[in-house]
Image: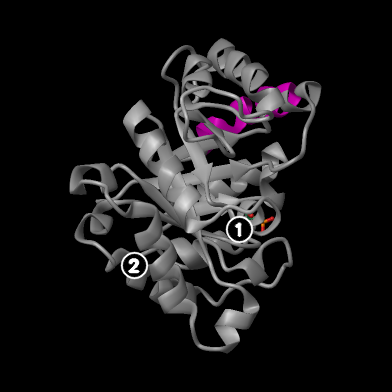
Amino acid sequence: MRKRVCVANWKMHKTNAQAASFVERFMQLVPSVPDSVELVICPPFTALHTVAASLSAAQGPNGRVKLGAQNMHWEASGAFTGEISAAMLLEIGVQYVILGHSERRQYFCETDETVRLKTAAALSSGLTPIVAVGESLELRHEGRTHSHVCAQTLGALAGLEPDQVAKLVIAYEPIWAIGTGQNCDPAEANAVMREIRGCVEPLQRVPILYGGSVKPDNIANYTALSDIDGGLVGGASLDAEGFAALAAAAAQREAS
Ligand code: PGA
């Protein structure tokens, strides 16, 4: 059975002080989340160290709440002002990294090629990439959702060995559903995710997460379906109570 995963993508939110108080409260709530759900918190770069220290104070090393970053560069080091390498992330305890989020593609010129380079670099350094794919409203209206997300997925995976692909997490996030409160119909999302899973064989075994306006009261409608293994959560992950409730609901295998 595939792992269930709920990822908090804080985007450009929370100072160090705010991040530390989130972790303090969230750790009190973690026992309410079934063990079957892996929990990952992705703060902005400036708060990674604080969250790492707060997590390890609360749960010791190798606890169940994992740390993730929201981006990284594919080179190991060099003259890349403003960038962060895999080694820098690993040193402070990061285990996951979101790659190719639509906001990075839209505002910061990420392409399938840069996502591919980052995915390969993350895997070879031992980080677990959470590769994000998703279509715009325009592509959806043109009936090109499936071909677009499959092209993005295959672009990110090009050149990887099957055993590397099996280590990924994929997130399907329709762009028009992100932060808009306009959810994708769960059955439609499930169909797209099944299509993604069919792109290459090892994806049958990897967690594929849905993202786009998920909330504690709608996540179970997604995770009840065959190909949806959890959520990549923006707005609803900023509040400790809300994210814990959402993760607990994501454990359900039947619609609420
Ligand atoms: P949202 O964001 O939950 O606020 O829609 C999801 C994401 O962009 O990862």
Compared to 60, does 255 lie above or below? below
Identify the residue under disc 2: 226
Q: Which residues are magenta?
A: 20-32
Q: Say what secondary structure mark 2 lies in.
A: loop
Identify the residue under disc 1: 102
Report if residue 163 is visible in the image: yes
Circle 1: residue type: Ser
Q: Where residue 18 sits: x, y (%)?
A: 79, 27
Which sits in the foreground, 241 or 164?
164
Q: Where residue 14 sits: x, y (%)?
A: 77, 33
Compared to 238, does 151 lie above or below? below
Task: Say whether mark 1 is within 8 Å of ligand 1.
Answer: yes
| Ligand 1 picture quarter | bottom right
Whether residue 237 appears in magenta in the rendering, the answer is no
Q: Where residue 166 sits: x, y (%)?
A: 26, 47
Mark 1 or mark 2: whose residue is earlier in sequence: 1
Q: Is residue 39 left or right of residue 27?
A: left
Q: Where residue 177 sits: x, y (%)?
A: 65, 68
Query: Could you give the CA–CA distance between mark 1 and mark 2, rounded to whole angstroms?
Result: 24 Å
Query: Which residue is at a point 20% across and 60% down the rendered structure image?
Result: 201
Query: Which residue is at a point 55% across and 71% down the rendered structure image?
Result: 135
Residue found at the very far front of the displayed protein? 79
Circle 2: residue type: Ser
- Magenta part, dominant SS: helix
Query: Which residue is at a point 44% across and 63% down the rendered structure image?
Result: 152
Q: Say what secondary structure mark 1 lies in.
A: helix
Q: Quadrant of residue 215?
A: bottom right
Q: Is residue 211 left or right of residue 252?
A: right
